[in-house]
Structures are given as C-alpha cells and as structure tokens.
C-alpha cells in the first residue's frame, strides 16, 4: 500500500486509497504537471513481478488510452517507478453500478434502459477501435454524481485474461460468457453477453446464476437455462426482456453481432416498450453430452445406493464440496427436470475446455460389471427397448441429414431450389418482416429465412452507423409483386474526409481548418521548449488520413517552456561575493552593482536590493544590489571626533535537524588595526541561535569601523546559516 504524499513519476502525488481489487489498488492523486486530480491504479506486488503480465498490461493500457468517449473512463498515462506499475485515469466522483444496485435494489425499466444505452455506447466505441473489454460487470462501471455511467478497466481486463483470471474470478464469473468460461476465443459478442447479464441484474436485482463456487457458476453459464426476468417481475417490458435474452444466448452467433445493433433495439424499446421487433433465435438443444465416470465416482454412487437402503432419505452432498470432478458429473445425473440444460452443439467430452478432471484416477473405460448391483437391477427391460429403438431412429435421422448435406454440396438436389436474392426466381410474396435498424447480417438472415427477394444498396448517412439498415422499399404487410424485390438501403457510415495537417499552426487557425473539414476538435496541453506557445505540437489522427465526418481530432497545444519560480534571498549585509553566491544557489543572477556612501552599513556590504527578499520570481531573473562605500569623508575639525556603535541581531543555524555541522561564531567590530569582540559562541542543530545581547555598545571610538563575523575563523558565511547582525554608528 502506498503512503499519502508519495510521488510517482515525479508528477503524481498520492493523496488517499479509494478502492482495492483482486489485482490492483486505486488511489486519488494530484497531477502536479496539469494541476488536476486523477485516479492512479497500481498493480499489486504479485502481478508486478510477472514480466509477461506487466508487458501485456502496459500494451493494453496504452491501447485503452486511445479511447475517448463520455461513457468510458479516460486513460491518461501509463508508467513505472522503481518497480511500481501504474495507470493514470480520469478521476470520477461516484460509486460502482454494483454498489448502486445494492443500495437501490432492482432498477425501474426506464432507468435500466438509460444505463444500458450508456454502457453499450461506451462498448461500441471500444469495439470500433478494436478493443474488447472481456470483463464487463457492474463492478467495472462507475455511476457518477451527475448520472453518467463510465466503463473502466479496459486495459487491465484484457491483460488479465491470460494468467490472472483465477485471482479475480469471484466477481467476474457471474458475468462471464460461455466461450470465456470454456477458455475459448472471445470477441465483441462476449462483451455483449456480459452486458446482457448486467442488464438482467439491473432489472431483477440479482444475477441469473448462483452457486457454491466459481466452477458451479461457470458450468451454469455453459449449460444452464436462466429464468426469464419477467417471471420475477411481470412489469418488465417484454421487448426489453427479449433484448436481455438475445444478449445472453449460449451461442455467440445468436446474440447481437455488434453493439450498434444492440443500441438500435434499446432505442426502440425506449420509444415503444410494447413493440415486437426483437428477433430472438432458439437456444435449445436435445443433445446431451456423454459423461465418462471414474472409479472414484462409481464408488461414490455405490456408497449412496447403500445408504439409500438403510436410511429414509438420501444424504445431501453440496455440489463441488470436496471433489469438483466427482460432484460436477454427479450433478448431471441428479439435475431436476424443471431446469433444462442447453448443451453446446459443439460439445466434445474429450475437449479440455469441458473436462473438469482434477484427479489422476485411472481413465480406463468402465464396463457394466463396475456398476452397483442395485442400479443394474432397477433398469426396466421396456425402457431398454425404447432406448435402443430411439438410438436406431436417431442414427437413421443423422444418416439422412448427412446425405442431404453431402448431396446438396454435390449438386444432387437442385430441383425446386431458388435464390431469394434473385427476383426472377420469386413469386408474389408478402413482406412479413421489418429489418430497419438491424445489422446487415441479421437483416439478410431474416429475409432469407422468410424467402423474401431483396437487393442491397449502400449510401452514406451521418446519423446511422455503418452496416445498419436505413430503410426498405416495402413495408411490413405489403405484397411484393413477382419479378421484383425489396430494396434494402444500408448505411455506409459517415462520409469520409481528409484530415488537414495542423501541426505547427496557431491553435485558433488549426481549429478553423479542422472545423471547415467538418471534424470535431478536442484539446490537450503540454509544455514544450521547441514549439511556440499556443501552437500545435501534434494531432491524432495524423494529417492526410481519411476519416468519417464528425470524427474527433485531438490536438496537443504548446504551453511554451515550463516556467519555474524561485524565492529571492535576503542580500542585505552580505559582501558582493556572498550576495552573488546566494543568488546562484536559487538559480538567479546578479544584476547591476552600484555603490553609495553609508554611515550605517559597513564598507563593502549590501545596503539594498532591487527585488525584496521572499518575492517569487522566474528562475534566471537578475537582482540588482547597492554596496556601501562606508561613511562619507568630512573635513578634520580642530577637536577630534569620537563615535559610538550599537549592535543588534542574531545568527541562526538553518540546516537540517539531523545535521552534524557546528560553527564557532565570533562577532567583532574592527577599527583600523584593532578589533573588539561583540559576541561569540557555537551554533548547531541542537543550539541553533547566537543572539547579540540587548544594548551591546562600544563608545569612545576614534573612528568608525566595520562589522566582521567569523565562522570557525573564516569570514565566509556557510549556506546553512542565516546571518542577521546590524550595527548603528553615531558621532558622540
């Protein structure tokens, strides 16, 4: 844990710890370069020592730094300081969505829709920038005080997928997609699944799957059937429920293919909660995987069967309590019929992604002799015949299906076949669907499924995302005449323009050039010794690139050289040499030196300075001084004059409290070849001050003299001593 006041990268001052997670700790910090508060996420020691993870962490965090959107927590910087790896992010005042749901319970549908749209908008921008989050969950979404939601942890989530999932899985497993749970490939549709689970929790106040441990929950995501939200709360709009169910389909291709398509449906629900426009594919399967059982599992079944003969009720064994392998597979045989399991069609019992084998038991195939006697005796012969007949029927169906697929590929079954895209092959049909707002892939699938002839035309549209259907030439319910087709207009996105190169231009001129190109401008500021103040240092995207109209172009504007200030020291009473040394120590220069007669300031010492001591000035500035020429000479009178000198002031040791320096100090008044000691003593960290006694005075002096202070016998004043001694000379 970092201490308050600690500096990272000579820039970020740690203020306080604001949160801690499985892999990192988050601190509120002060950015002294840009004078703003930031959030600094620091990797814990156990991950900082993993070079592979640190490398991925830095690359992905730098990639996340390129994301700029109101619903994404901006990443400003990535750094390392003496083995401490950190990310600097936007500091957002608020709480996580998880805390918000815990505080407020399930959310009203209208608020949940608003939250879902904000989250999806942030994810959409990330996906467009080829960044997949892989850990969308309420814990990674911040609800700010003004109601804006911000998705965070883009960089750290991706870096964590390879080797740190176990440490952070407890919070994530409730939102993990089936393909992630199996350790398979994840893409944009994995984020959409996790967002669907998050929406489920927003409208019901609970997650769909709960279990005794992570493996149990992961298996439920792979095989379990979730209870639809409206079974808990019928007031949830049916269309919103369909969106949630579509997002959480087991197979990725049955979900929304893009965040843009999801956003389009969410907006429809917001304007028409009772509309029926969500296309929801089936997600059931009658195939169940064959589960191989080990000797240990069979022994467990035998023991349970033996107990059944001697007890009224079977002993209850919590799932995954001792052996995850044994009890996970036992669950397959005791699953209640009211909770159907949706098994992945691609299930392979030998695939490591499905094999939760944590033991090293003998893997030889068991035979009938290994089964317990009481299990074997309970098998009904009629049931055996039914199973055998069912197996034969299934084999025949599979053979016919294979023949159909092979025959179609070989061109055996071309009769009666037509291409729905070809209007010449169609008869008059009814337009039974509305594909406006759908992704082009979804629209084509729907049209082909309903055998509706169509053609596609692309056109630019500033308001509709690319690959989304803008319009259709026939409305739902219209009859499409034979020989014609439905024209589907698909957005090609915003019209592209060339980005002007504005590097080196004055900021207002650069803004005009970019705005004339119909681009948006955002700013960042940096100090620069090479680029003139208020001129552009760099831009992103670079000049000459082609981008869509309205794209944000970030320009970095020069603040000029970084200005550093210092405090002017007190030069009075110092010699010219001492004054110059004092100015050099604080990066200031000695300016003009003039001389004046002075009856009070000894010869050769500073009478005054052009800038008062304690004033803040820019480093490199100069300070003028005036040196005493001593008292002005007068004509000799018949009677010799006598003088008196009154002394005051002190000498103080200002070095560090633990300094071992000590100085023998002597204050003398020198007249001609004679001198008299005014005060003397030793100063150090433990005895820091030598004070001139009140009323110290010399009288009857034949001439005026000069004040002299010696440190260990030398007239040179040490840097860790503050000298403030004055003498007033008057004619008696």
Image: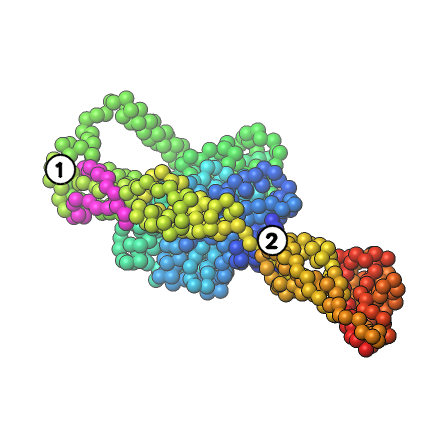
| Residue 263 seen in this snapshot | yes
* Residue 149, position as x, y percentages in the image: 43, 57
Mark 2 is surrounded, within 10 Å at the Cα level, by few (under 14), some (14 to 19) or many (20 or more) other residues, namely some
| Residue 262 seen in this snapshot | no
Give the residue drawn at x 58%, y 57%.
Answer: 618
* Residue 369, position as x, y percentages in the image: 56, 31
> Chief secondary structure of the magenta span?
loop
Quarter of the view holding residue 724: bottom right
Q: Which residue is mark 2?
A: 620
Which colour assignment does the render follow?
rainbow
Quarter of the view holding residue 418: top left
Separation of disc 2 and disc 1 at Cα? 82 Å
Q: Which residues are magenta?
A: 452-477
429 or 161: which is nearer to us? 161
Q: Which residue is mark 1?
A: 484
Q: Is residue 434 left or right of residue 728?
A: left
Q: Is residue 354 magenta?
A: no
Give the residue drawn at x 32%, y 43%.
Answer: 548
Quarter holding the N terminus is bottom right
Residue 220 sits above or below residue 292 on the image: below
129 or 599: which is nearer to us? 599
* Residue 259, position as x, y percentages in the image: 36, 47
Give the residue drawn at x 35%, y 59%.
Answer: 236
93 or 172: which is nearer to us? 93
The kind of secondary structure element at disc 1 is loop
Task: Give me the disc on residue 81.
Answer: none
Mark 1 is surrounded, within 10 Å at the Cα level, by few (under 14), some (14 to 19) or many (20 or more) other residues, namely some
Which is more foreground, mark 2 or mark 1? Answer: 2
Quarter holding the C terminus is bottom right
Residue 251 sits above or below residue 682 on the image: above
173 or 610: which is nearer to us? 610
* Residue 348, position as x, y percentages in the image: 46, 33
């Amino acid at each position: 844990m970092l201490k308050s006041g600690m500096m990272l990268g000579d820039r970020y001052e740690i203020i306080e710890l604001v949160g801690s997670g499985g892999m990192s700790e988050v601190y509120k910090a002060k950015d002294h370069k840009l004078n703003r508060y930031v959030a600094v996420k620091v990797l814990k020691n156990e991950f900082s020592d993993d070079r592979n993870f640190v490398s991925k962490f830095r690359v992905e965090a730098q990639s996340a730094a390129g994301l700029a959107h109101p619903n994404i927590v901006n990443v400003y910087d990535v750094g390392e300081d003496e083995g401490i790896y950190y990310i600097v992010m936007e500091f957002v005042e608020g709480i996580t969505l998880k805390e918000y749901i815990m505080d407020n319970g399930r959310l009203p549908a209208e608020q949940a829709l608003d939250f879902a749209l904000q989250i999806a908008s942030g994810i959409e921008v990330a996906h467009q920038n080829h960044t997949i989050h892989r850990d969308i969950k309420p814990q990674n979404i911040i609800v700010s005080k003004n109601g804006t939601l911000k998705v965070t942890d883009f960089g750290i989530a991706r870096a964590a997928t390879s080797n740190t999932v176990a440490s952070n899985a407890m919070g994530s497993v409730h939102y993990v997609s089936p393909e992630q749970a199996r350790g398979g490939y994840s893409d944009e549709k994995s984020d959409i699944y996790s967002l669907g689970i998050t929406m489920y929790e927003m409208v019901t106040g609970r997650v769909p799957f709960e279990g005794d441990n992570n493996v149990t929950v992961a298996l439920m995501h792979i095989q379990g059937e979730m209870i639809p939200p409206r079974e808990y709360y019928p007031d949830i709009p049916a269309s919103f429920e369909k969106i949630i169910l579509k997002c959480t389909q087991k197979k990725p291709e049955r979900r929304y293919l893009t965040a843009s398509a999801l956003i389009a449906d969410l907006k429809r629900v917001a304007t028409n909660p009772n509309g029926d426009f969500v296309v929801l594919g089936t997600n059931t399967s009658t195939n169940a995987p064959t589960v191989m059982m080990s000797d240990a599992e069979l022994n467990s079944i035998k023991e349970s069967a033996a107990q059944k003969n001697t007890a009224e009720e079977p002993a209850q064994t919590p799932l995954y309590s001792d052996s995850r392998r044994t009890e996970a597979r036992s669950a397959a045989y005791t699953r209640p019929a009211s909770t159907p399991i949706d098994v992945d069609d691609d299930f392979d019992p030998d695939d490591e992604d499905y094999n939760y084998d944590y033991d090293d038991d003998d893997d030889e195939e068991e035979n009938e002799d290994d089964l317990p006697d009481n299990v074997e005796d309970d098998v009904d012969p009629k049931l055996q015949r039914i199973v055998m007949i069912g197996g034969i029927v299934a084999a025949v169906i599979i053979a016919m299906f294979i023949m159909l697929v092979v025959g179609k590929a070989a061109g055996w079954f071309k009769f009666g076949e037509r291409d729905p895209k070809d209007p010449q092959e169609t008869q008059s049909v009814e337009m039974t669907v509305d594909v406006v707002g759908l992704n082009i892939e979804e629209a084509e699938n729907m049209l082909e499924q309903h055998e509706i002839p169509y053609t596609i035309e692309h056109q630019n549209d500033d308001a509709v995302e690319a690959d989304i259907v803008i319009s259709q030439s026939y409305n739902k319910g219209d009859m499409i005449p034979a020989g014609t087709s439905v024209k589907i207009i698909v957005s090609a996105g915003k019209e592209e323009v060339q980005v002007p190169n504005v590097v080196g231009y004055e900021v207002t001129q650069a803004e005009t050039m970019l705005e004339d190109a119909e681009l948006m401008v955002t700013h960042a500021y940096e100090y620069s010794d090479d680029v003139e103040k208020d001129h552009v240092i760099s831009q992103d995207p670079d000049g000459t690139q082609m981008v869509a109209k309205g794209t944000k172009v970030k320009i970095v504007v020069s603040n000029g050289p970084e200005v550093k200030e210092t405090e002017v020291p007190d030069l009075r009473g110092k010699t010219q040499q001492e004054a110059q040394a004092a100015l050099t120590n604080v990066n200031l220069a000695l300016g003009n030196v003039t001389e004046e007669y002075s009856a009070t300031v000894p010869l050769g010492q500073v009478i005054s300075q052009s800038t008062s001591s304690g004033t803040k000035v820019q480093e490199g500035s100069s300070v003028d001084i005036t040196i005493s020429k001593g008292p002005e000479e007068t004509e000799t009178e018949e009677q010799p004059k006598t003088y008196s000198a009154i002394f005051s002031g002190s000498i103080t040791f200002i070095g560090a409290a633990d300094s071992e320096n000590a100085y023998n100090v002597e204050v003398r008044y020198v007249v001609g070849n004679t001198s008299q000691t005014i005060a003397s003593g030793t100063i150090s960290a433990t005895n820091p001050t030598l004070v001139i006694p009140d009323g110290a005075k010399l009288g009857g002096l034949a001439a005026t003299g000069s004040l002299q202070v010696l440190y260990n016998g030398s007239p040179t004043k040490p840097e860790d001593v503050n000298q403030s001694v004055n003498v007033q000379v008057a004619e008696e």
